[in-house]
Structures are given as C-alpha cells and as structure tokens.
Image (cartoon, coloured by chain):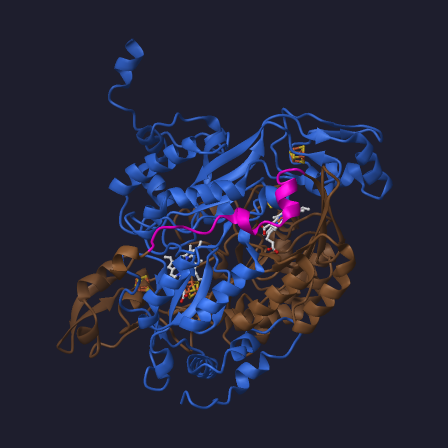
Chain colours: A blue, B brown
C-alpha cells in the first residue's frame, strides 16, 4: 500500500478553490510512506463518512506525563505506516514569535523524526507535530530540548499557557502578556509536565478586554488587562475622526454600554467613574483614545467547554491586580486554588465545575479571598441560605 | 550515561530572542495602529517608528516545506522575523513598506491569501477531525476549506458590519472551545455508541470503561455470555469518552453523525458582555468532500447579518437587538423542539414576559 500513491479523488476536490488547501499541504510531504498512508486513510474516511483513529494506551517521553497524544489507526494492516501516529505538543514561544532560524530548526527536527506535517498551532497554543511512531518519541524529544524547545501540557496538568501579542505590538496592552506567560510557564514546569490535578488547568493572558486569546471562554485562569483611571483622550484626534466621517454620536456615544460619553462637536467627555472598560470607544478611535495609565488585570476563574456540566465563562475573582514580575499575587492565588481543588475536586472536574458544586462563597472562604459585589451579576434571588453555625456568636461580639 | 545528560523541564525558549529590533526598541510604547489595506497593519510607536504587518491565512495544517518557504520569505523581507496569530494566520513583520507589494505577491503565488484584518472573517479556528482524532463526528479541515472557499471575499475585504469569528470543532469536546463564536460549526454524534460484545472482553477493562462515562450511563452487563457492558441510552450525551478508553464501544457512526450550527457568541468585552453561541441549526448531514448543506447554511447567515446589522454590531448583538423570532424569520431557518434547552437550568432560557413583537 504505502509504496505507491493511492488515488484520492475526493480529497483532490479539496485542492481546488481560493483558500489554502490542507490536502496540498499533506501532499507536499507525500514522499514519506507515512504521509501516503495518511492520505489513503483520509480518503477512506471521506468515502465512508467515518474516522479511522482510535486512542488506546499511554505513550510519552520518559519522566513526562503529558505532551504527547497517542494515536493508533483502526486499519493497521491496510495502512501499516500510520498504525502508530502520535502527536507532540511543543511549547510555543510567547505570542508565537519566531525567527526563520528557529523555524528551520523545528522543521529539521520534524523532518528527521516524523511526518513533516504540523499544526501551526493547536488550539491551546502549542506547535503541533502531527504523527510519528513510538520509537521516534525519545530521539525527537532529545533533539527538541537540545535546540531549546520543550513539550507542552496534556492530560490533567497545567496546560501550555498562551498570550496575546500584547506590548510587543499592541498599544492597548495593559500589562506585559508575553513576560507573564513566559514566567508562569517556566515557574510551573513540573505542574505542566507531570499531571497531578483532578483535570486540566489553563492559563491565558490577554492584554486588554478585547481578549484576543479568548481567555474568558477557554481558560481556567483568565488574566485580562484593564485600567483604573481615566481613558486618555487626544481631543485634536477626536475632531479628526469626526472630520474624517466617524459619526461620533452614533458610533461612540450611543454604542457605549454605560452611556458615559458625551460629544458637543468639539470636546469628547467621558465620565470615567461609569466606564466599564469595554474598549469599544478605543477600538473605534485608536488614534484618539487610549486606556488609562494605572494599569493591571482582572483575574477570572473557571471557563470551560460544555463537557460535561455545561459550558462556562470565567467569572471575576480579583477585580484589579497589578501585574508586575514576579507575579507573586497571581501565583499565590493559583496555588491556593490548586490546593483546595486538588484535594477535593473529582476526577475530570474542571475548577469551574468544582466551584459550582461547592459554591463560590465557600470556595472563596477556603482559598482566603473576601467576597466582593464585582464577583456576581447580581446577589442571589433564592432564600435557601445555609448559615454557618458560628454566625450568631460572631454577631454577639 | 544518557539519562544523566537528558534535558527536561527547560520550558519554551525565551520570546525575547525572537522579537525584531524595532519591537525590542518600542516594546510597550506603541501609540496607535491603522489598517491601510486589508491584511496590512501599521503600528506607530511613540518614537515615530513604524512596524508593518502583513497577515496571511493558512489552513493550520502546514507541511514543513511550507514553513521553510515562510522562513525564506521572512529572510527576504523581514530580516527573518515572523509570527503566528491566535487564529492560525501567519504574520510577516516589516520595517520597509516599499517591500509590501512584493511580499504580498510572493505569498499569493505560494497560495496564501493576505487578509483577515478589521471587519472581516479571519481564519476559522478548528480542530483535528478525521486527520487525527478518534472521536471526530466529521472532518475539520475539509469543512473549513469548503467554508473558507465560499467566505473568501470576506477574508480579503473588510466589508462586514464588524468582525465575524467562525470556529469549528469536530465533536462535543470542543477542543478550541468554539462555544463563544459569532458562528460555530460543531460536529455531532447523535446516537449512543454501539458495542462489540465479542471483542470488548478481550481488549477493554470493564471498570475503567464504566468510570470513563461522565454521566454514569455505562453499567457492567453480561451479554451473550460475554462480560461486557450496557449503555443507558437516555443518559448518553455522545461525548465519546468511553470510546477513548475502549475501542469496542463505537461512538462514530457513518449514517447518523453530522454537523450543527451555533450563532451569536463573542469573547470580547467590547460594548456587550461576552456570550455563548446559541443553537441555530441542530443537524445537517455529513456530505464530504464539500459539505454543501453546511456551506449554504453558513453563507446564508453571514449574508443576512451583513445586510441587516448596524455598523460595529457583532452578530450576537444584532440578534439581541432584533430578537430571536426575527432571526429565524430573516434567515428562514426552521425553529424546532431541539432549539429549546432541556439540560440543567433550562427554565432560565424560557421567555417569561409578554414583550413580544407581533
Ligand atoms: C472532555 C473534554 C475533552 C476531551 C475528551 C478532549 C480530547 C482531545 C483529544 C483526544 C485530542 C487529540 C486530538 C488529536 O490530535 O488527535 C484533543 C486535542 C486537543 N484538545 Fe481536547 N478534549 C477535550 C476538551 C478540550 C477543550 C475544552 C479544549 C480547549 C479549550 C481542548 C483543547 C485541545 C487542543 C488545543 C488540542 C490539540 C489539537 C488541536 O488543536 O486540534 N480540548 N483533545
Ligand atoms: C480595532 C480593534 C482591534 C485591534 C486593532 C485588535 C488588535 C489585535 C491584534 C494586535 C491581534 C493579534 C493578536 C495576537 O495574535 O496575539 C488581534 C487578534 C485578534 N483579535 Fe483583536 N483587536 C481589536 C479588537 C478586537 C475585538 C473587538 C475582538 C473580539 C471581538 C478581537 C478579537 C481578536 C481575535 C479573535 C484575534 C485573533 C485574530 C487572528 O489571529 O486573525 N479583537 N487583534
Ligand atoms: S487582547 Fe488587547 S492588548 Fe492583547 S492583542 Fe488584543 S487588543 Fe491588543
Ligand atoms: S470603554 Fe466602553 S464603557 Fe468605557 S467609555 Fe468607552 S465605550 Fe464607554
Ligand atoms: S473536538 Fe473532539 S473530535 Fe475534534 S479534536 Fe477535539 S476531541 Fe477530537
Ligand atoms: S458517549 Fe459519553 S455519555 Fe455516552 S456512554 Fe460514552 S462516555 Fe457515556
């Protein structure tokens, strides 16, 4: 089978059209027997409307509990070269910056040890090396670490943290997302490589409330930049936008969610005490408006996809935290959460689900955070309050 | 001995070595940016320095042949500096704007379109599908390719009321968490797994299998003399966790697997708060290689949104303004019992007022 090219009429159909074709990408590496078998297997899936992969058995590199996804084909006789077709998650550099040399080094390593196919990048952020045999795992890992790269997380561990482009290229970054991401990744190498949690724990660092890394939807710990003081306004530039056709009244004032902006044709006035830092006005007039100068981040906890208890967005834990290295407060919070969730969380229970099970109020008490109204959309509407036993004594004091 | 010298836990390389000098110099000191043309951004620093970014779409699945070609382009135009975005786009970072036309031409000759900025459809965040995952209800790359071929004008132009983020996941696990996208395309299994009772006792451990099910739907059972399991079908929500630990419990089904479409989510905090995507179409058939039903449905939603939304209004904000009845009316999508939530807290999604449009 793997010696010759099998006809792939259905996949060939996907070489047409203006969008770059993944089939063309696969074919670029099809001098490899492994990739020819992949094409054959995929064509079978297209014919039969069903996948041909199975899980089964743990694979990995010595001393690590994560970073490799084991994959086996359910048609090993027909496609022997991809009977084993494991992936590596290679921890990406902060904000996915590379030099051409670093890319070539990665390509050379993958040329030697695997299919030559990658994902740039996996949804968590890692560089994905797609498909190699079990025997290649250790040598590939040795080459990677020699070149200064390491594996990312998988399983019930800290997953590879990721961040937006932040201060490297974005005027709105309210803290250094790249450094925070790098620092946290380096600090928690053990937690990242050796799964010891009830389930996965993801960090994502976004520099402002636009949240270009979708941290509020995809991370157990979302760190989203924000500011406390006044939006910086350049009135001259506001007038330029108005002269250039921006309808300030309709596009800015009326679309501000708190109605805290007024415009008299000359001056833009923002009632900053009412501003909820949504970014809309700044997004529309980047030359005129900027976040304030007293900057930090809001820390939110607990996002996850639906499986199993339903999808959750992260919710506010710390309304405002200064984000300066070495990020002691953030680490303290993460570790307090891991201690409590690590001990009482059920197997495969994300921290967001755990918080719902034990109740946010109880959770806060255990990790030593005081409740504040910023943490809720509104106070409870049901009267089923479980009072602590010592409550009355407290009040007597 | 080899083990002693083995390096571990070194973490990723420090990003600082990959930042171009202009970024190192102006780090955290950017003043503003503009989008002079689709796919090109200029970031102006307080120092007056200008950094030009050319963004190109990719299929995410890239051959090392292509990555090496990108590295060559980075050498030719950008002193070797290059990055990727959170949505699988590749970005070339230039200081000399006169090189942009030639770079764009080279990229387009290589087959990678420049675009995805501003009020456009950027690349579709997606997952593995039949290329690599065991629980995929459909293929990821093929559906994404078919969709982007049709949505292409919205990638290379900035002709929509606001950004429109499309995401794809091939099963309910939703790697990549598509559940907060303007349009989410989600592969769905629609039947409980079938069990090969003859094979199961030979390849699987029953206790592991039983505990793998998040809803407790799996029970040990003796079937035709085999120490196997049975599945309480009403309790199964088709997550495929059982198949992960036991290949004899087959979640994939060529006849009944398909695709659902969800709309109106967002992650940004701009204007309205982040929100989940909601069900628009519960099921469309798996129809490779081009999935015409799925493509038609998505294009329809995009068109109706583009014609009706106000400037800056994201798809979900537009629906919030006009109301769901009008969304179904304008798109012509039938509303069915599957659209009504019946999971935990479903009652919170029922309409409990008479504020209705007639
Ligand atoms: C119970 C829930 C989940 C299960 C059982 C699950 C299972 C898997 C499996 C089996 C793969 C391997 C795919 C392959 O390469 O063959 C995978 C990949 C991946 N998963 Fe999940 N997943 C779950 C939820 C999630 C969620 C919620 C996210 C993100 C928010 C996520 C992020 C990823 C990423 C980034 C990959 C790498 C491959 C890619 O980017 O396509 N997973 N997952
Ligand atoms: C004019 C306003 C905006 C500008 C100039 C802007 C700037 C940026 C920048 C610099 C990136 C690259 C970040 C990275 O890859 O790490 C980016 C990507 C992204 N932004 Fe924004 N942001 C804006 C508003 C928003 C808003 C309002 C949203 C969400 C609703 C958003 C969502 C995203 C997403 C999802 C990406 C990934 C895009 C891609 O890879 O193609 N952005 N944006
Ligand atoms: S999240 Fe904010 S700071 Fe980060 S890249 Fe997006 S717009 Fe810029
Ligand atoms: S950031 Fe949002 S809430 Fe604040 S003034 Fe601007 S539009 Fe209004
Ligand atoms: S979404 Fe489901 S099928 Fe797709 S890669 Fe993730 S686990 Fe696999
Ligand atoms: S598919 Fe999921 S819910 Fe259904 S039986 Fe298997 S593990 Fe349980």
- Taking depth in this image into account, of B17 and A242 the one nearest to the observer is B17
Residue A319 place in picture, x, y as percent: 49, 30
The quarter of the displayed image where residue A379 is located: top left
- Quadrant containing ligand 3 reads top right
Residue B37 seen in the current view? yes
Residue A381 place in picture, x, y as percent: 43, 32
Q: Is residue A352 above or below residue A7?
A: above
A281 magenta-colored: no
Tell me where the magenta segment starts and ends, as one range: B7-29
Residue A384 seen in the current view? no
Q: Is residue B91 left or right of residue A193?
A: right
Question: Looking at this rendering, what residue extends furthest in the top direction?
Answer: A397
The quarter of the displayed image where residue B55 is located: bottom right
Q: Is residue B24 left or right of residue A255?
A: left
Q: Residue at x 61, y 66 (%)?
A: B70
Residue A224 place in picture, x, y as percent: 53, 39
Q: Residue at x 49, y 81 (%)?
A: A30
Q: Is residue B98 above or below residue A17?
A: above
Residue A372 place in picture, x, y as percent: 45, 26
- Taking depth in this image into account, of B350 and B26 the one nearest to the observer is B26
The quarter of the displayed image where residue B253 is located: bottom left
Q: Residue at x 66, y 66 (%)?
A: B151
């Amino acid at each position: 089978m793997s010696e010759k090219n099998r006809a792939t009429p259905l996949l060939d159909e996907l070489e047409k059209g203006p969008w770059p074709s993944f089939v063309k990408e696969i074919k670029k590496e099809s001098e490899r027997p492994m990739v020819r078998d992949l094409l054959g297997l995929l064509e079978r899936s297209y014919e039969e409307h069903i996948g041909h992969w199975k899980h089964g058995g743990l694979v990995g590199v010595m001393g690590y509990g994560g970073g490799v996804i084991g994959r086996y084909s359910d048609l090993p006789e027909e496609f022997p070269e991809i009977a084993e077709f494991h992936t590596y998650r290679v921890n990406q550099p902060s904000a996915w910056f590379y030099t051409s040399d670093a890319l070539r080094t990665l390509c050379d390593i993958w040329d030697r040890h695997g299919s030559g196919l990658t994902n740039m990048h996996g949804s968590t952020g890692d560089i994905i090396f797609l498909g190699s045999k079990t025997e290649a795992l250790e040598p590939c890992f040795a080459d990677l670490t020699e070149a200064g790269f390491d594996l990312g997380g998988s399983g019930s561990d800290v997953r590879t943290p990721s961040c937006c482009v932040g201060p490297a290229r974005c005027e709105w970054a309210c803290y250094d997302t790249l450094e925070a991401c790098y620092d946290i990744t380096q600090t928690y190498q053990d937690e990242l490589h050796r799964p010891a949690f009830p389930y996965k724990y993801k960090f994502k660092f976004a520099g402002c409330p636009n949240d270009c890394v979708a941290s509020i939807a995809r991370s157990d710990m979302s760190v989203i930049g924000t500011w406390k003081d006044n939006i910086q306004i350049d009135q001259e530039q506001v007038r330029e936008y108005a002269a250039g056709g921006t309808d300030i009244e309709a596009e800015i004032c009326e679309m501000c969610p708190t109605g805290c902006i007024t415009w008299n044709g000359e001056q833009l006035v923002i009632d900053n005490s009412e501003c909820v830092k949504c970014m809309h006005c700044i997004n529309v007039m980047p030359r005129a408006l900027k976040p304030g100068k007293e900057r930090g981040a809001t820390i939110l906890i607990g996002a996850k996809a639906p499986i199993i208890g339903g999808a959750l967005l992260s919710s506010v834990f710390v309304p405002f935290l200064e984000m300066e290295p070495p990020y002691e407060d953030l680490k303290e919070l993460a570790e307090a959460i891991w201690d409590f969730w690590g001990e009482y969380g059920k197997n495969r229970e994300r921290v967001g689900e755990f918080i719902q099970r034990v109740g946010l109020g109880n959770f806060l008490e255990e990790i030593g955070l005081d409740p504040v109204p910023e943490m809720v959309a509104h106070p409870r509407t049901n009267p089923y309050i479980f009072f602590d036993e010592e409550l009355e004594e407290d009040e007597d004091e | 001995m080899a083990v002693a010298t083995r390096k571990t836990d070194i973490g990723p390389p420090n990003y600082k070595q990959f930042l171009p000098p202009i970024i190192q110099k102006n780090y955290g000191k950017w003043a503003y940016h503009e989008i002079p043309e689709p796919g090109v951004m200029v970031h102006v620093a307080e120092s007056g320095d200008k950094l030009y970014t050319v963004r190109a779409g990719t299929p995410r699945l890239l051959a090392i042949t292509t990555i090496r070609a990108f590295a060559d382009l980075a050498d030719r135009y950008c002193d070797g500096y290059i990055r990727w975005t959170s949505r699988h786009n590749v970005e070339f970072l230039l200081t000399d704007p006169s090189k942009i036309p030639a770079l764009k031409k080279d990229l387009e000759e290589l087959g990678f379109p420049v675009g995805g900025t501003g009020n456009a459809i950027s690349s579709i965040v997606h997952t593995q599908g039949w290329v690599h995952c065991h629980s995929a209800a459909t293929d990821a790359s093929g559906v994404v390719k078919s969709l982007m071929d049709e949505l292409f004008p919205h990638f290379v132009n900035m002709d929509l009321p606001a950004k429109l983020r499309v995401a794809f996941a091939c099963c309910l696990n939703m790697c990549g968490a598509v559940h907060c996208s303007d349009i989410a395309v989600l592969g769905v299994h629609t039947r409980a797994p079938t069990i090969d009772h003859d094979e199961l006792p030979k390849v699987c451990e029953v206790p592991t299998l039983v505990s793998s099910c998040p809803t407790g739907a799996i029970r040990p059972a003796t079937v035709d003399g085999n120490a196997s399991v049975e599945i309480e079908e009403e309790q199964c929500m088709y997550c495929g966790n059982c198949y992960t630990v036991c290949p004899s419990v087959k979640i994939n089904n060529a006849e009944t697997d398909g695709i659902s479409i969800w709309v109106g989510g967002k992650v940004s905090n701009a204007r309205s708060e982040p929100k989940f995507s909601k069900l628009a179409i519960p099921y469309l058939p798996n129809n490779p290689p081009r999935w015409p039903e799925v493509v038609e449905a998505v294009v329809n939603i995009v068109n109706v949104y583009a014609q009706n939304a106000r400037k800056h209004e994201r798809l979900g904000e537009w629906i919030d303004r006009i109301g769901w009845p009008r969304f179904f009316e304008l798109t012509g999508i039938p509303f069915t019992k599957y659209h009504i939530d019946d999971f935990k807290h479903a009652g919170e999604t029922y309409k409990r007022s008479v504020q209705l449009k007639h």
